[in-house]
Image (spheres, helix red, strand yellow):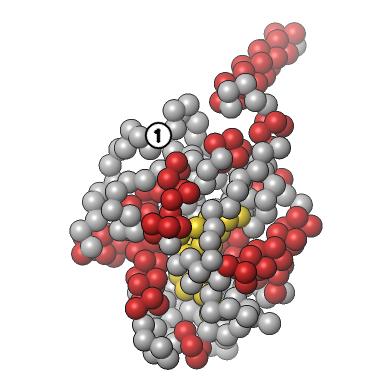
Amino acid sequence: TADQQQRAEVEASKKAKRVLNRFDGLSVEEVMTRTLPDVIAPNLDILIIGINPGLLSAYKGHHYPNPGNHFWKCLFLSGFTEKQLNYSHDQSLPEIYGIGFTNMVERTTPGSKDLSNKEIREGGRQLLAKLQKYRPLIAAFNGKGIYEIFCRETFGVKAKNLEFGLQPYRVPETQTVCYLMPSSSPRCAQFPRAQDKVHFYIKLKELRDQMKGMASGSDVQETQYSFDLQLAKEDAKRMAIKEEQYDPGYEDEGGAREGQSQVNGHCTFSSDAPREKDASPAAEGGVQDGRWMTQSFADQIPDIS
C-alpha cells in the first residue's frame, strides 16, 4: 500500500542518515576505500590475525575499535597489560608488549561474507609470506574460521574438529607456532562475554612466557585442561586479575557497535564426547576430548608442507 511504501522510504532515509552520522558524513562506499595498516615488526612475541578490516576499523584506522569487541578487555583481564588499553594504543603494542596486528585480507568490507574466494585464497598466501618474513613467536588466529581458511586455502589441509589453543602445525620455514582463540567479537555465541574468553588469553600469555623462557633444546609442554567458566575464574583469581569494569575512555564516542566480522558467524567448542577409536590426533587438530595436548614444540609440532 501507499502507507507501507511511505513508511519504508522514511525508514530507509533514517538508516542512511544514521550511517552518515556514524562515519562523520562518509558513506559506506567511501569508508570501504580506506585500508587498515598492519601494526607489525620482526620477531614479535605474538601476531594477532584477523580476517579483514571492518568498516569501523577502517574508518578509525585502528584495530578492534568496536566498543563491544572483547579484544582489549581480554588483553587487560588476562594480565598482558597492566592497565586497560583501547584501540588508540594499538601502534604502541609491538614495542611495549611485543604484540602486533594483521589481517588475512586487506580489503575493507561490511562483513567477511563480502569477500570472494579468490581474495581469501590470495590473502592466505600473503599471510604465509608475511609470517615467514616477520617470524613472530606465535601466530594467534582471532577466530576459528580464520584458521580453517589458513589451513585449507594455503596448505590444502582440512582442519577437522578444531580445538582452541595450541595447534599441531608450525608455519613452514619458521619456528612460529599457531594458536587458535575464540573470536573476540561479541557475536561469538559460545563465548558471548569477555570474561568467558579470558581463559584463552591467559593460556596464550603462559605459552608466550614458556616459549621465551625455555632453554635451547628443552621441551615446552601445554597444561591439560577442559574448558569451563569456573576454571577461567580460578585462573583469573590466581593471577589477581580484576573483574571487568566499565572504562569510559574505552567507549567509542559515537556509540557505534559494529561487530567484528566472522567467517563462520559463530564460535564453537567441541564437547568431551568420545571420538571414533580410529580418529587420528593429527587429523583432529592434535587434541583429544576437548583437552590441550601435551607435546614438545621441537619434536612433535610438524611443519605444514
Q: Which of 123/183 is in front?
A: 123
Residue 208 in view of the camera = yes
Quadrant in the rendering for residue 152: bottom right
- Residue under pointer 1: 251
Residue beneath the point at 40% across and 77% down: 211
Q: In the image, residue 112 lies at what x, y percent?
A: 65, 48
| Nearer to us in this view, 280 or 252 | 252
Whole-percent x, y for residue 218 in the image: 39, 90
Query: Which residue is rendered at x = 75% and y = 8% of the image?
Result: 2
For residue 113, say whether it is visible: no
Residue drawn at point x = 44 percent, y = 86 percent: 295
The correct choice, above or below, for 46 with respect to 15 in the image is: below
Q: Is residue 209 left or right of residue 174?
A: left
Quadrant into which the N terminus falls: top right
Q: Is residue 36 left or right of residue 270?
A: right
Looking at the rendered structure, the secondary structure element under dot 1 is: loop
- Residue 165 or 53: which is nearer the viewer? 53
